[in-house]
Image (cartoon, helix red, strand yellow):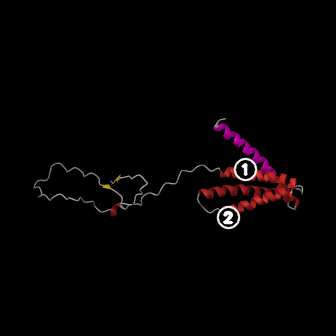
Amino acid sequence: MTEHTETAVRLVILLAIGTMAGAAAFTHVHDLSVTHGQPDWIGWANAVAVELMAIYLGLELRARRRAHRPVGLVASLLGAFALLSLAAQVAEAEPSLWGWTVAAVPSLAFLALVKVVLSNTPALPPAPEPDQPPIDWDDVPEQTTADPEPERPADPVPPAVPAPAAAPAVVLPPRGVVQSNRPHVVGIIR
């Protein structure tokens, strides 16, 4: 089986389980709301709010983890909405161990599916190491040579050909700025 075919099969299974488990979870929350005195449309509103809030909070949790932001409140809310959905499943069930177990399956399958899908984050490239601190080129002192040329007397006649431009100076970072485990790069300024 090719990777493309396997991905398509996984997507079909994901949609089938998600649709069936979501429909059962929506129906149980709706029926519980209506049984306890809510109008029919509010029962559906409750079902939409409870079930979609769990999905949204899962997506928000994933986004916050990627951004390295705190996830405590979002994770707590996700747990609360998942428990609310599960409680609605169990409350509608026959009052027996098997009745509660069978009624909980759609909600647990739906939550497990959401968890698997949302935890399947793509591999991110490692964060680049910070570059060297910026250098203000106006504050860099002039480079001098150790052996200055002796002064020559001024020529009475200026040369007819302009002097060639000096080669650009190579500026090295101060010792210890570049980490020893990184390759050293020497840049040419201007």
User: Which range is magenta?
Assistant: 3-24
Q: x%, y% of residue 71?
A: 64, 62
Q: Earlier in the sequence, mark 2 or mark 1?
A: 2
Magenta: main secondary structure equals: helix
Toward the top, the furthest residue is: 1
Q: Quadrant of residue 90?
A: bottom right
Secondary structure at badge 1 equals helix
Q: Which amino acid lies under the numbered mark 1 shown in the image of this protein?
A: Leu
Q: Quadrant of residue 56?
A: bottom right
Q: Which mark is residue 113?
A: 1
Residue that numbered label 2 is attached to? 73
Q: x%, y% of residue 2?
A: 64, 36
Q: Is residue 117 magenta?
A: no
Q: Residue at x 78, y 49 (%)?
A: 21
Q: x%, y% of residue 172?
A: 34, 57
In the picture, the quarter occupied by the N terminus is top right
